[in-house]
Amino acid sequence: MTTLLITFTFISLIILSIFILLQKDIEQSVILFMGFSLGSTILFFLFSAPDVALTEAVIGAGISGFIFLSSIIQTINKRTKKSCNA
Amino acid sequence: MLKKNISLETIVISLFISFMIVLILGVLQNITLTQNSLGMELLKINESTTQSANAVTSVVTYFRGLDTLGEVTILFLAIFGISLGIDRSRPSKILNIFEEDNFLLKFGMKIIFPLIILFGFYIILHGHLSPGGGFQGGVIIASGFLLMFLAKENNFNLNHKILTIFESFSGVGFVLFGVLGFVLVNNFLGNFLPLGVLGNFFSGGVISIIYVFVGIKVASEITVLVEYFMKIKDEGKTND
């Protein structure tokens, strides 16, 4: 049962990461990246590493997503409404 | 949304890669801890040396305590580098992620913010009993302050003097406990307190005290980091 869950989570994380890479809008890609962190939290928990899962949930899904979003908003070009690195 | 021109080739390659990774995972699952590995040795001596119910915590603060000191120093240097790169004299305003004032966020924050702080301190104080510890609890407390910034409650500002005092005193306390261990039991970050009974709140000796220091240090540092990224340049106020 646990093996099945791990396999399912792993495959969905790989599909989600391909979605993140192919995303045109960077902000949507950051939001999906936070979802990816949430998925990897489940994976860490299934691997019986709850300490790492807690760290990943707080850092990956919370603080790092906010830092990415803030950086994108601060580097956006107001005239073209596009991010500088797009 | 996926791009429209995604080819069949990409899908086939990605499916192949995922199949390979699942295969590797299946191989990895059959690997168990051998009797002579370092992890098994640490698990064996954990109960007799630290009396901490969470073996990860005793590895982080007791067996590898010096590494944790280096980790905390690296985090401090990272925040210091970011603070050098950000010009604090410029006119700034708080980042506006939402279009207008969010009623639900503003009033839900008043209920949730104390609970988040309480949960963070719970994670820090019970680091030697349950999953978690100083770093995780500290970041949870900082995420509570992030929620405070997002809700823009009364133009919320941080008191940097108090944060600096918390941060430096916890850092000094960490090193002080290490030196105390060196003086009393001839071992840097060694245990000189009574160990207690496995599973009790007052157990684990010096571990929980060191984790409280780490938690306060990480909480104040990440809170300052969040503030740096929350205050953006105010274009309306610039004259040039």
Image (spheres, rainbow, N blue to C red):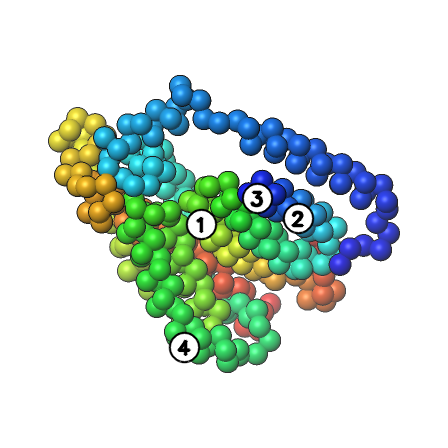
Residue ID at (30%, 46%): B129
Of the pair B13 and B94, the residue shown nearer to us? B13
Local crowd size for mark 1, using a 10 Å CA cut-off: few (<14), some (14–19), many (≥20): many
Disc 3 versus disc 2: distance between alpha carbons? 17 Å
Q: Amino acid at mark 3?
A: Met
Residue that label 3 marks: A1
Q: Which mark is residue A12?
A: 2
Residue found at x 47% / y 53%: A58
Residue B192, x across and y down, in percent: 15, 35
Judge the density around disc 3: few (<14), some (14-19), many (≥20) Cα neighbours within 10 Å: few
Label 1 and label 4: CA atoms lie apart by: 31 Å
Question: Relative to B171, is B36 on the left or the right?
Answer: right
Q: Residues at marks 3 and 1, common chain? A: yes
- Give the residue type at disc 4: Asn
Q: Amino acid at mark 1?
A: Leu
- Residue type, label 2: Ser
- Residues under labels 3 and 1: Cα distance? 23 Å
Mark number, residue A54? 1
Q: How many numbered markers are drawn?
A: 4
